[in-house]
Image: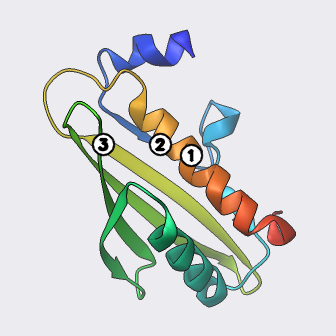
Amino acid sequence: MLKRTLIGLLRSHEATGDKAKDPLLKSHIYKLSKEKAWEEVVSTLKKMQGYKLLHEVKSVGEIVLEKRTMTGRTMDITVTVISVNPVTSAVDIYSASKGSLGDLGSNYRVILDIYRTLDKKLAAFKA
């Protein structure tokens, strides 16, 4: 966690993906069709405290959220639902803070928080 804070002094964004070096930032795969995964992810994100759903584009599989930190900074979060094959979907997250300097690792923690919530809701479908 100290490493994340130090990295966060300079960087004010974080992203997940297939090739992420940190195992916690790897794409999360669920055994659900894109449509079903989309419905589950959107309904879960709408219920999360502290996050405001700005807009969703089902055709692209993109959900944009906003979160305000205790210090008043705004974080823009993009959650993407991607179809891997007809019965499997992946969820990736990109989080960026507005403002100068870094985020002290808050984008990293936000991504882990969202993944934890989604994994709890979709535990039966985790690949």
The amino acid type of the residue labelled 1 equals: Asp
Q: Nearer the viewer, mark 3 or mark 2?
A: 2
Query: Which amino acid lies under the numbered mark 3 shown in the image of this protein?
Result: Ala
Image location (x, y in percent) of residue 119 = 72, 58
Q: Quadrant of residue 53?
A: bottom left
- Number of callouts: 3
Q: Which image quadrant: the C terminus?
A: bottom right
Task: Return the disc, 1 or 3, that comes first in the chain's sequence.
Answer: 3
Disc 3 element: strand
Q: Is residue 63 left or right of residue 2?
A: left
Against 41, is 48 above or below? above
Residue 4's spot in the image, x, y percent? 49, 19
Q: Are marks 1 and 2 in contact (CB under 8 Å)?
A: yes
Can you say whether 123 is above or below 50 in the image?
below
Residue 89 locus on image (x, y percent): 67, 73
Q: Which mark is residue 110?
A: 2
Q: Tell me the tag on residue 61.
A: none
Task: Name the residue tied to disc 1.
Answer: 113
The residue depicted at 38 percent of the width and 60 percent of the height is: 78
**Rendered residue at 41%/88% (across/down):** 59
Question: Crowding near pointer 2: few (<14 within 10 Å), some, many (20+)?
Answer: some
The quadrant the N terminus occupies is: top right
Residue 15: x and y in percent read: 46, 44
Which is nearer the eye, 90 or 99? 99
Which residue corresponds to the image point at 62% horizontal and 83% vertical from the top-left? 34
Which amino acid type is shown beneath numbered disc 2?
A: Val
Q: Secondary structure at mark 1?
A: helix
- Vertical relation: 40 (above or below) 7: below
Inter-mark Cα distance, 3 to 2: 10 Å
Give the number of the disc on residue 96: 3
